[in-house]
Image (cartoon, rainbow, N blue to C red):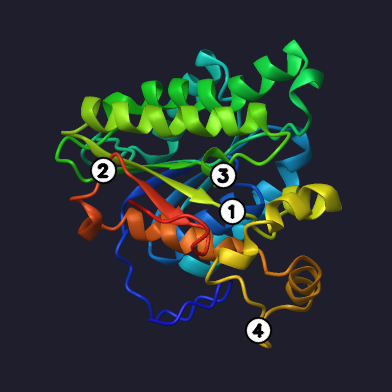
Amino acid sequence: MSVNMGSYQGTFPRIYEHKLALVTGSARSIGAAIVQNLASKGCNVIINYATEASDESAVALAANLENEYSVRALPIRADITSREECARIVSTAKEHFTDSQTGSFQIDIIVHNAAVLYIGPLESVKESEFHRIYEVNVLGPLLLTGACKEYLPTDRSGRIVMLSSIAGTTGPENTSLYSGTKGAIEAMARVWCRELAERATVNSINPGPVMTDMYMSASDTVKESLALWNPITPLVAVRETDRPEVKELGKKFGGRAAYAEEIAGLVATICNAEFGWCTGSVISANGGSSFST
């Protein structure tokens, strides 16, 4: 199987044909890479995003996926921190994806990717920032999964993937809020894997730095704190085949960040039917700076 992201050559198995995936925060960056990977394997996708500023990119992404992979892609701008908005995501999806012959509607895959970041020492934390980051990173996945529950499969074939972070394990300085939210969603995954055992597996992955807007816009101080783990991370060595911007940052900080499509590939693997005996786990997605146990 050869995957050339953005250029469908019709050579890879469409193992998610007729399935439907809902991916939050998927108009750009890691989320966009995830929906592209799933679509390349035949999956219909819901591109959820939060702001009007992403309208154009979400619509363009949906059109590209439909054209390249012959799937159905639906962009939905909605705030997952609202129960009413989560219900609207589901009702809108039902309008577009309900089987016209059988009347059935099912959400096979949910990827909780949307997140916000707050960087600052613990004494500078503002109550408003605490509530904002926990609403988006923790409450949002909780409300959305609750809204989708009755439409998950009933044969354990469903897949829920939580995007955690290596920050929850390594505890970089000045990430009290962000790291706390990631620890929370890992804990929720362990609870949900029991509550939803007859419907879906529920696993988390914990990426380290990824070449996204969030990472690229971070200060050198933040990048340096993340780079402290590079000397013991097996896969971060920069190679000649890496992209120029990856080489530049990799040489500056002693190791490269991940490509978004590397994270997307792991998510798609977890969604595979053959991954059905794994649930409640945190799966390493950081080049080896921490290991799955």
Q: Which mark is residue 239?
A: 4
User: What residue type is disc 1 on?
Assistant: Gly
Image vertical order of residue 60 relative to residue 254, above or below: above
Describe the element under mark 1 as helix, strand or loop. Answer: loop
Label 2 or label 1, whichever comes before in sequence order = 1
* Residue 103, image x, y percentages: 25, 34
Residue drawn where x is 54% and y is 72% of the image: 235
Image vertical order of residue 100 relative to residue 19, above or below: above
Q: Are marks 2 and 1 in contact (CB under 8 Å)?
A: no
Describe the element under mark 4 as helix, strand or loop. Answer: loop
Which residue lies most toward the top here?
A: 127
Q: Residues within 10 Å of mark 4 (few under 14, many from 20)?
A: few
Residue drawn where x is 78% and y is 78% of the image: 244
Q: Quadrant of the N terminus?
A: bottom left
* Residue where numbered disc 1 is placed: 208
Residue 55 visible in this rendered orientation of the protein: yes
Residue drawn where x is 79% and y is 72% of the image: 245
